């Protein structure tokens, strides 16, 4: 059984929503992104596909969401449809881009503080520069003066964004994402598909129901949509990534996540048209039920050191590690499909009691509490709260420890409830290696 990413990361989402303001996901004023870039039809990314691909291409960077970037193309009935990575070829660099400057109608302007259109289009150009800098030369752009010279157009549409769902506005659209990848034939020498890639236009709506977007909002929406224009067919499954389908204010302010960067760098390092896998004609093979770990706990020889937050630990050997601004996420598979995980958060609360009073209701809502007990981690006192999700399938152990410097460490260990006793020694072994600096 593979546990859903949303369930495993519920603590992170709960804390982020509780502390975020502005464009919260699904809130009164969300910053939504393109609904034209949907997931590849009927294909659900599976870590078995990913691990087979990674064995053939061991240099891809972790953590990533590469399987959510694939383009699906029809193939023969015996083997199923092809899943390919498609992007701009090296010979297109620098990609000629035309940024169209609109006339902003008075109805959208604030009469007391009108905004010059060139400030908004400058924000879109900054988004291009951010991608260039982040991908370290793998992608480059060249601004041109006319639409005819461009392979890609960025258009700021002086209209209010559409609202396909209540309290949700689609502020950006990338044209023809589903048709961007055009296979030309199999290249047997390189074991890849010869492909042509084309995205003609990115559109950013200039206003929502409150009026013109700010420069930073325009830049954030353009940043997301340019990601689609660079080859991202779908959306990241994790709300902490810029390429998630709904962009919250906090994520927009932080920009590209590690998973965003790793995914696009890997995409542009892989051969264009690289073959990820097939969609089985009869659908995916059912996954085997989760099994207990074999042998005793095995920890990595080198510790993970977070000098910024002041802690270190040794994660289980071979587990994927994904640092984030509040700590570390580590799991026994990709960050979007795994059975067992452990996550560390550092939060500015002086005591365990004050933290649980503020966030406990959100963290434990909809769960069944098994027990709570005092605990000591890294010589600091704390409390363990053990719960199961509403289905009874997932065991979640929260360890909340006061660090004595105005902060608490929150440790979330998650695994199938049926295997909790088998994985418990692994979690305890990791906790025993935690050091606070």
Image (cartoon, rainbow, N blue to C red):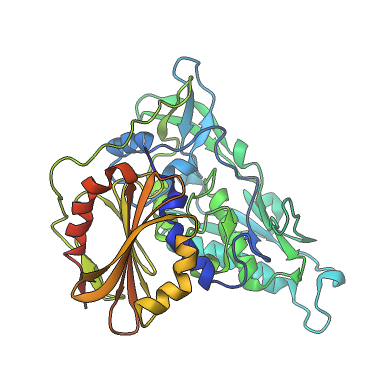
What percent of the width, then of the height, locates residue 327?
34, 67
Above/below status of 164 relative to 181: below
Image position of 226 (left or right of 422): right
Q: Nearer the viewer, residue 263 or 201?
A: 263
Q: Nearer the viewer, residue 174 or 374?
A: 374
Residue 215 in view in this figure:
yes
Q: Residue at the spot x=16%, y=65% of the render?
A: 433
Location of the C terminus by quadrant is bottom left
Q: Residue at the spot x=45%, y=23% of the render?
A: 280
Image position of 4 (left or right of 217): left
Q: Residue at the spot x=41%, y=72% of the render?
A: 356
Location of the N terminus by quadrant is top left
Residue 348 in view in this figure:
no
Above/below status of 251 relative to 393: below
What percent of the width, then of the height, locates residue 314?
19, 61
Q: Quadrant of residue 218?
A: bottom right
What percent of the width, then of the height, locates residue 266?
38, 48
Q: Nearer the viewer, residue 253 or 314?
A: 314
């Amino acid at each position: 059984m593979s546990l859903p990413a949303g369930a495993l990361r519920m603590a992170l989402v709960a804390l982020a929503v509780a502390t975020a303001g502005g464009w919260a996901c699904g809130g009164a004023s969300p910053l939504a992104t393109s609904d034209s870039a949907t997931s590849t039809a009927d294909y659900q990314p599976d870590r078995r596909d990913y691990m087979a691909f990674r064995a053939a291409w061991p240099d891809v960077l972790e953590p990533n969401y590469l399987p959510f970037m694939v383009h699906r193309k029809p193939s023969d009935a015996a083997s199923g449809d092809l899943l390919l990575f498609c992007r701009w070829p090296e010979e297109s660099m620098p990609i000629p881009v035309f940024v169209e400057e609109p006339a902003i109608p008075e109805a959208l302007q604030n009469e007391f503080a009108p905004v010059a259109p060139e400030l908004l289009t400058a924000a879109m150009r900054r988004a291009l520069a951010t991608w260039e800098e982040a991908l370290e030369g793998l992608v480059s752009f060249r601004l041109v003066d006319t639409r005819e010279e461009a392979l890609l157009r960025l258009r700021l549409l002086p209209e209010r964004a559409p609202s396909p769902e209540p309290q949700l506005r689609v502020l950006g659209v990338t044209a023809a994402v589903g048709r961007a990848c055009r296979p030309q034939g199999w290249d047997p020498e390189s074991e890849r598909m010869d492909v042509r890639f084309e995205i003609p236009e990115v559109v950013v709506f200039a206003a929502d129901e409150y009026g013109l977007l700010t420069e930073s909002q325009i830049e954030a929406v353009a940043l997301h949509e340019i990601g689609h224009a660079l080859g991202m067919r779908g959306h990241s499954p994790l709300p902490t990534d810029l390429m998630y389908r709904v962009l919250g204010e906090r994520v927009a302010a932080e920009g590209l996540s590690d998973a965003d960067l790793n995914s696009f760098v890997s995409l542009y390092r892989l051969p264009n048209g690289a073959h990820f896998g097939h969609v089985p004609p009869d659908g995916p093979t059912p996954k085997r039920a989760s099994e207990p770990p074999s042998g005793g706990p095995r920890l990595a020889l080198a510790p993970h050191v977070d000098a910024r937050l002041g802690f270190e630990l040794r994660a289980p050997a071979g587990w994927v590690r994904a640092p984030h601004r509040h700590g570390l996420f580590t799991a026994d598979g990709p960050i979007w499909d795994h059975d067992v995980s452990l996550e560390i958060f550092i939060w500015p609360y002086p005591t365990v009691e004050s933290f649980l009073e503020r966030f406990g209701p959100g963290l434990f809502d909809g769960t069944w509490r098994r027990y709570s007990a005092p605990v000591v981690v890294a010589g600091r006192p704390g409390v363990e709260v053990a719960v199961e999700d509403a289905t009874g399938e997932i065991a979640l152990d929260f360890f909340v420890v006061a660090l004595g410097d105005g902060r608490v460490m929150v440790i979330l260990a998650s695994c199938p409830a049926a295997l909790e006793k088998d994985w418990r020694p692994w979690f305890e072994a990791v906790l025993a290696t935690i050091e606070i600096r």
